[in-house]
Every structure is written in C-alpha cells, then in structure tokens.
Amino acid sequence: MKRTFLAIVIMLLFIACKDTKGEKGKILMIVSNMEDMGDPEKHFAGNNLWEVAPPYHIFVSHGYEVDFVSPTGGNVPFSMDPMGISSYTIKYENFKDKVESSLTPDEVNFKNYQAVFIGGGYGPLFDVANNENLLPIIAQIYENGGVVGGCGHGPGALANVKLSSGEYMVKDKKVTGFPNSTEVTKSWAKEGTLLPIMLEDQLRANGAMFQNKRDLNDKHDVVVDERIVTTMFLPSSAIVAKEMILEIEKY
C-alpha cells in the first residue's frame, strides 16, 4: 500500500513537471557517506534513494543543475532498490554519475547555489548534523537568500546550523521531520537507540517550532517557513523539491 501511494505521488509530479531546456541555476544536495550505524548487527545508515532521486528529478526537469556534496566526497551508500521515477532518473538524468562523484565540502562555493536539500536515511544524522565543514555551507546559502529543504531524517541535519548572528537557523521557524512518536516504534535504528540524536528533540532544543502529526492536517504535509521547506515522510520528498522551486522563483 505504501509503495502504491509513493508511486502515485511521484508519477503525478513527474507528469506535472514542465519541460525546461535552459539551466536556471544550481541546487546543492547533501548526502551522507555513512554505511552503517556502528553496531554489531550493522544496521544501515546511509541515504534513502526515494528521498534523494525523486527530488533530484524534480530539480533537473525544471531546468536546475544539481551537485552532490558529502562529508568526504566520492561515492555514497543508498538503501532501497530503484523503482519508478528513481529508475528513470538513474538511467536518463545522470543521477548515478553525479552521486558517485560527490564533491567534498572544500570544493563547494556557496555563492553558486540557489538552494540546498538534504534527503532522508539515517546517515545525515551521523556525519552531516555536526559536520563543521557542511553546516556553514547551509548557513551561507540560506543567508545569501537561498532556500533550504529536507525530508524525513534530513531536517535533523539542519538543527545545528548557526547563522552569522550566532542564532540557530531553525529558531522560531516551523520545521518538521521524522517524529519521535514514529522513531520509537521502528526497529530500523533499534527504536532510535542507535542514533546520535533524536531529530525532533534536537530541533526543539535549538528553537524550532517542530510540527508533529497533531500539528498537521496530514502527516505527509510539506511545511514552508521563511525559505525552509520540510516534510516528515518520504512520499512527500518530491513535493518538497517542487515547493523549493516555487520559493526560489519568488525572488
């Protein structure tokens, strides 16, 4: 049922995409190099393909060039077999080549990017959320008028971003992401016990107005507040990308 819902959402967005031939600018996607969570059972950390490939497709099909950056550069691990739009973007939109040669932070000039997106999978909580080389890039893109987006566990990597004022980027902003109430019911990270941070707790601690299931009309809603665009769960990852484009093109 979940796969059917995901496929329908993504295909509707695919059909709605406009055919844009010229490049409109560049968007940076941050991905994790983490393979597992460091436990004996080797629970997978990494990146969730369904939270990275569909947004990538939305960005490139609307005329934006996309670069990937990771903490150490190079190839990055993904969970889940490709299906639907993920298969399409891997085969026809240069996703595979791009993500297998992700940039290192020192190769990124924030002035070149209109937005930055972080997809889900547990990986970003391990090697992005406290990365002293990546967090400043997010802050710089945001303070340069750029748009910031995240899906699932991706927003956990936004929690510790500090602006030049010394304040956290998420302070007093409505932000959502994978909630505690769902985390503690899942075995993927042993009910959250393997994680370095609980996403919801970290966002709240740094001043975000975290939007839980009870705050939203639907758990798949996308939350937009002052150029920060987030969602809880993977079926809405492509919608986050579309909303980010709308934010970019406002200015």
Image: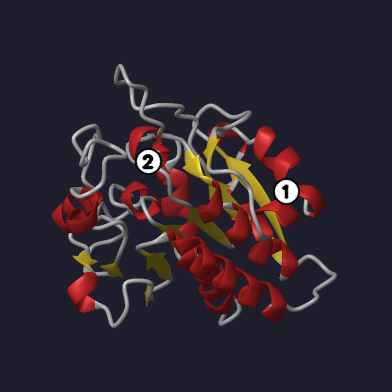
Question: Where residue 122 is drawn, which disc sits there?
Answer: 2
C-beta proximity under 8 Å, tags 2 and 1: no
Report x, y in % for residue 51. 51, 54
For badge 1, the amino acid type reads Ile
Q: Secondary structure at mark 1?
A: helix
Q: Name the residue tied to disc 1.
A: 90
Report x, y in % for residue 228. 40, 67
Report x, y in % for residue 250. 56, 82
Q: Quadrant of residue 175?
A: bottom left
**Would residue 89 be found to the left or right of residue 155 on screen?**
right
- Residue 85 in view here: yes
**Would residue 35 be found to the left or right of residue 82 on screen?**
left
Choose the circle earlier in sequence order: 2 or 1: 1
142 or 68: which is nearer to us? 68
- Residue 146 in view here: no
Residue drawn at 79 percent across, 49 percent down: 91
Residue drawn at 45 percent across, 63 percent down: 2
**Would residue 60 be found to the left or right of residue 237 on screen?**
right
Rounded to the nearest whole Å, what is the CA distance between mark 2 and mark 1? 22 Å
194 or 70: which is nearer to us? 194
In the image, residue 86 sits, relative to residue 38, either above or below, namely below
For badge 2, the amino acid type reads Tyr
Q: Mark 1, residues whose alpha carbon is within 10 Å: few (<14), some, or many (≥20)?
A: some
Q: Residue furthest right?
A: 21
Q: Secondary structure at mark 2?
A: loop
Q: The N terminus lies in which quarter of the figure? A: bottom left
